[in-house]
Amino acid sequence: MKDTYKTITKASPEALFKDRNSKFFGYAFPVKTEEEANLYLEELKKKHHKASHWCFAWQLGKTDFHYRANDDGEPSNSAGMPIYGQIQSFEVTNILIVVVRYFGGVKLGVGGLINAYKTAAQVALEKANIVTYTIDEVFEIHFDYPEMNIVMRLIKENNLNILEQKLALDCKIYISVRKKEAEAIFEKFDSTYKVEIKKIDV
């Protein structure tokens, strides 16, 4: 079971690729929503308001991916999909890549465009800080004070990450567990006397 994903932590430095007087500026941004991606796109359109095309692709999600690729007036599949191909090649998600083109007066042809957009996206990703995160599940553990010692021992023995503790008339502890270990951890707490555990959707 795959329980990791790769993304970038911050916007990449500007990348530049030139071909026959056309300039292609590549940018990569970390995004979690389509709205966020649109905001970055609008910012670039203001910054490069004299450019001829603002082509892009984004991918969102950790396990169930959805994506969009846009040619922005370039010939069909000559820009957006080559950019998206680099997202797939680098295996990154929650990311937006925009390639801004300034037309240099010489037509590159579809093959030339595919190469240019692909290369600008590739260079942007090579400049980006790509990190790997685990996919975690969150559980709520509910118990009374007499069970505190056994719960804390299980947490310590299994090296679990405590997200939050609510200690009032009874106790609630929220933990995060790597996806591939989640079932085994659930069973350990579920089989412990007077301890309740349930998965929380976050």
Image (cartoon, grey):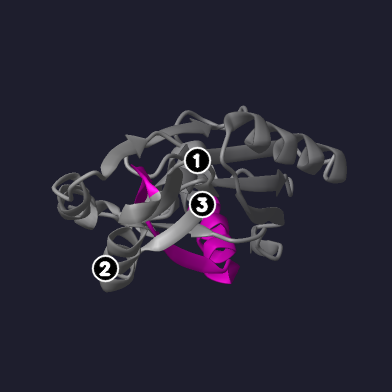
Point out which mark residue 93 bears. Answer: none
Q: Quadrant of residue 39?
A: top right
Residue receiving disc 3: 165
Magenta-highlighted residues: 116-144
In this rendered view, identify the residue nearer to me: 154 or 163: 154
Give the left or right position of residue 44, taking residue 167 as reference: right
Q: Looking at the picture, does residue 110 appear above or below residue 4?
A: above
- Residue type highlighted by circle 1: Leu
Point out which mark residue 158 bears. Answer: 2
| Residue 67 screen position, x and y as percent | 44, 34
- Residue type highlighted by circle 2: Asn
Q: Looking at the picture, does residue 30 appear above or below residue 65?
A: below
Q: Is residue 119 magenta?
A: yes
- Give the label, 3 or 1, closer to the camera: 1
Q: Is residue 10 visible?
A: yes
Q: Is residue 64 visible?
A: no
Q: Residues within 10 Å of mark 1 (few under 14, many from 20)?
A: few
Point out which mark residue 169 bears. Answer: 1
Q: Residues within 10 Å of mark 2 (few under 14, many from 20)?
A: few
| Residue 18 screen position, x and y as percent | 65, 61
